[in-house]
């Protein structure tokens, strides 16, 4: 097909019979087409190269190079198999029709012509080819856009990973030295205000480091570089140690964080570090979005299929169904205002979602505004380590 748009489609008529070419020209020009002619397969190749027709009407039976050979050569010389070729044959046997398609023909028509059908067949082929051309162009554009998006995403991932790595070093120094100063290892600071200020510096540094760690974790998860290290461990013991660690944080001070009865908690094979991070993130959210006098409960139970459901429940502000879905999207806040009440980068639940899915599990959020939220992690039954039977 011509690379430049035409107002009048050009049809190449290839036939060794001059009378047949003349009749085709009269009918096609009357129907609004421009016509180029070739009297053999060899001349068809030359005309095709010089005028780039929009469609080809190609007779099968010709001396020398017949229509089948000509069709094969035309397809071989095209950069793309796009120019419609209508094979003209007086042979209506199945073998000839199959050979027409095998050599690259778009369609076939038998002699003697029904001239109305010929014109409509050519128009149909041109419309179909134009649709195909537009589809191919759209596919190329989509592929280019996809490649650009993937490159941009890779660049973003690398930038965030490098940025997070570079930030951790000075943050560790800030936290370490502020802790040292607050401890007054080398003597009294004098004014008590200094102790308040240094404590604020330390708290801000710890908060910033946690944010950097979350960004680095999300970057590894998004890029597929987060590799699980599964091992068998007691889920109840992990919950106890994680809650003890959480109670030592400033946000959990004086909060009632409860653990359900230890009976029935299984041994599972999972990445212990990842499970601990998931539980810490859920506890942090539960405490952040509930009043100081409200309890937070951690529980574990199997479902009828043997999957293990680890849940964290609070009696906090709750969410609508739409807000719960939004909370799982990275860097999205349910309250998106700059002056929002609750701090955070919007990564806690999205990290939990990706980590549990990496274990082959799922996350479920049951929440009602002004009632509370229960977030449940479902570990597949295949990760449960069977209890060893004793004598």
Image (tube, helix red, strand yellow):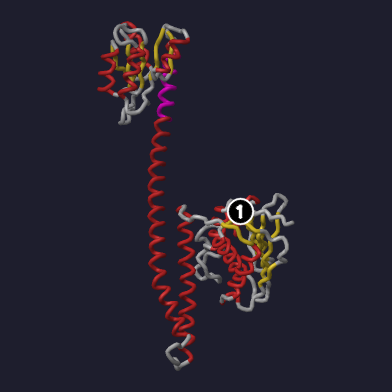
Q: In screen coordinates, is 208 left or right of 382?
A: left
Magenta residues span 117-131
Q: Is residue 20 above or below residue 336?
A: above
Q: Is residue 121 magenta?
A: yes
Q: Is residue 202 magenta?
A: no
Q: Is residue 75 above or below residue 140?
A: above
Residue 40 screen position, x and y as percent: 28, 11
Which residue was labeled with disc 1?
362
Quarter occupied by the N terminus: top left
Residue 348 screen position, x and y as percent: 54, 63
Residue 332 screen position, x and y as percent: 52, 60
Q: Where is residue 142, by image quadrant?
A: top left
Residue drawn at point x = 26 percent, y = 14 percent: 43
Q: In screen coordinates, is 277 left or right of 103?
A: right
Quarter occupied by the C terminus: bottom right
Q: Is residue 326 visible?
A: no
What kind of secondary structure does the magenta stretch mostly adopt? helix
Instruction: Residue at the far front: name it.
Output: 391
Front residue (pair 208, 224): 224
Q: Where is residue 287, by image quadrant?
A: bottom right
Element marked by disc 1: strand
Residue drawn at point x = 31 percent, y = 30 percent: 3
Sort mark 1 into few (<14), some (14-19) or many (20+) by Cα contacts within 10 Å: some
Residue drawn at point x = 71 percent, y = 66 percent: 260
Front residue (pair 249, 276): 276
């Amino acid at each position: 097909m011509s690379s430049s748009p035409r107002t009048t489609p050009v049809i190449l008529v290839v036939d060794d019979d001059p009378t047949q070419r003349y009749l085709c020209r009269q009918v096609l020009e009357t129907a609004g087409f421009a016509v180029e002619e070739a009297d053999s397969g060899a001349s068809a190749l030359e005309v095709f190269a010089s005028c780039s027709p929009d469609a080809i009407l190609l007779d099968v039976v010709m001396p020398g190079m017949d229509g089948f050979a000509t069709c094969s050569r035309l397809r071989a010389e095209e950069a793309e198999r796009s120019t419609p070729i209508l094979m003209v044959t007086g042979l209506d046997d199945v073998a000839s029709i199959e050979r027409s398609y095998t050599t690259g023909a778009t369609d076939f028509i038998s002699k003697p012509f029904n001239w109305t059908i010929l014109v409509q067949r050519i128009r149909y082929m041109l419309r179909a080819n134009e649709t195909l051309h537009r589809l191919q162009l759209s596919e190329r554009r989509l592929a280019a856009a996809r490649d650009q998006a993937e490159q941009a995403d890779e660049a973003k991932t690398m930038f965030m990973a490098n940025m997070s790595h570079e930030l951790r070093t000075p943050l560790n120094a800030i936290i370490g030295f502020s802790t040292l100063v607050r401890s007054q290892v080398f003597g009294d600071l004098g004014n008590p205000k200094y102790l308040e200020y240094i404590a604020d510096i330390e708290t801000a540094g710890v908060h910033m480091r946690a944010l950097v760690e979350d960004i680095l974790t999300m970057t590894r998860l998004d890029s597929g570089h987060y590799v699980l290290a599964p091992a068998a461990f007691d889920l109840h013991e992990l919950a106890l140690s994680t809650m003890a660690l959480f109670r030592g944080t400033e946000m959990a001070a004086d909060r009632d964080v409860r653990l359900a009865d230890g009976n029935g908690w299984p041994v599972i094979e999972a990445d212990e570090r990842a499970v601990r991070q998931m539980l810490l993130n859920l506890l942090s959210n539960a405490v952040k979005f509930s009043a100081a006098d409200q309890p937070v409960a951690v529980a574990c139970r199997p479902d009828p299929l043997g999957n293990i459901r680890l849940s964290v429940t609070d009696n906090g502000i709750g969410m609508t169904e739409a807000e719960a879905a939004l909370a799982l999207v990275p860097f999205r806040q349910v309250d998106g205002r700059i002056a929002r009440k609750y701090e955070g980068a919007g990564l806690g639940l999205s990290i939990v979602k990706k980590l549990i899915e990496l274990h082959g599990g799922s996350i479920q959020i049951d929440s009602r505004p002004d009632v509370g939220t229960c977030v449940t992690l479902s570990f597949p039954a295949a990760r449960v380590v069977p209890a060893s039977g004793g004598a």
